[in-house]
Image (cartoon, rainbow, N blue to C red):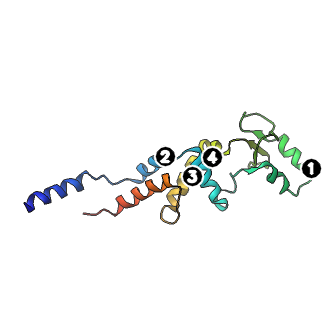
Amino acid sequence: MKNNRNKKMKSIKASVVRMSEDDFRTALEETLTSELCKDIVEDDWDRFYEIIFEDLESFCNERGENPWEVLRSFWYGEDLDTESDPANPMREYARFNSYGNVETTDYPEDIYYSNHLDEIIDYIVEKVEYKEFPDEIQEIIDQYLNFGDMED
């Protein structure tokens, strides 16, 4: 009887496949949505300050620049929703690009998802043991960490 139990345990252990980092990244990519990306980005301003959007009113009010510079940065900027120039001051959100020009959108979560997904996944992988993430992502993290703990 004991022999059968040992065979079953070995069979169960053999059927458990450890999740590799590549599989972990793939699972994250399949689970992340634009809303989850937005939550993660907005939760760590220090890390994502270069890509984060602010609501347009705050964006404009916090700039101590002269009005000409603000107008110039809109004129040479881009509306990401229509992929056209100039930036649209009627959008809800804005940020500066690497050239100091304004990018505007009504859907920052879509921009984070489509343009920064790899960066967000890298961030999750780096912080996997140190930070709590939204439930959907935390389930994958828990799976990944628990599989790593299973030893013969």
Return the residue at label 4: 112
Q: Which mark is residue 67?
A: 1
Residue 62 at what x, y percent from top left?
83, 57
Q: Which mark is residue 31?
A: 2
Local crowd at mark 4 within 10 Å, few (<14), some, or many (≥20)? Answer: many
Amino acid identity at mark 1: Pro
- 55 vs 86, nearest the viewer: 55
Category of crowding for the residue at label 3, using alpha-carbon neighbours closer than 10 angstroms: few (below 14), some (14–19), many (at least 20): many
Q: Residue furthest bottom?
A: 130
The amino acid pointed to by label 4 is Tyr
The Cα atoms of the two marked residues, 2 and 1, are separated by 43 Å
Residue occupying image coordinates x 13% and y 56%:
7
Q: Amino acid at mark 2?
A: Thr
Q: Residue at x 79, y 46 (%)?
A: 101
Counting residues from the start of the chain, the first of labels 3 and 1 encountered is 1
Mark 3 residue element: helix
Q: Amino acid at mark 3?
A: Ile
Q: Which residue is mark 3?
A: 120
Q: CA distance from mark 1 to mark 4?
A: 29 Å
- Which one is earlier in the sequence, the residue at label 4 or at label 3? 4
Q: Nearer the viewer, mark 2 or mark 1?
A: 2
Decide which of tag 3 and tag 2 comes sooner along the chain.
2
Task: Tell me whether the residue at label 1 lies in contact with that at label 4, contact meaning CB atoms closer than 8 angstroms.
Answer: no
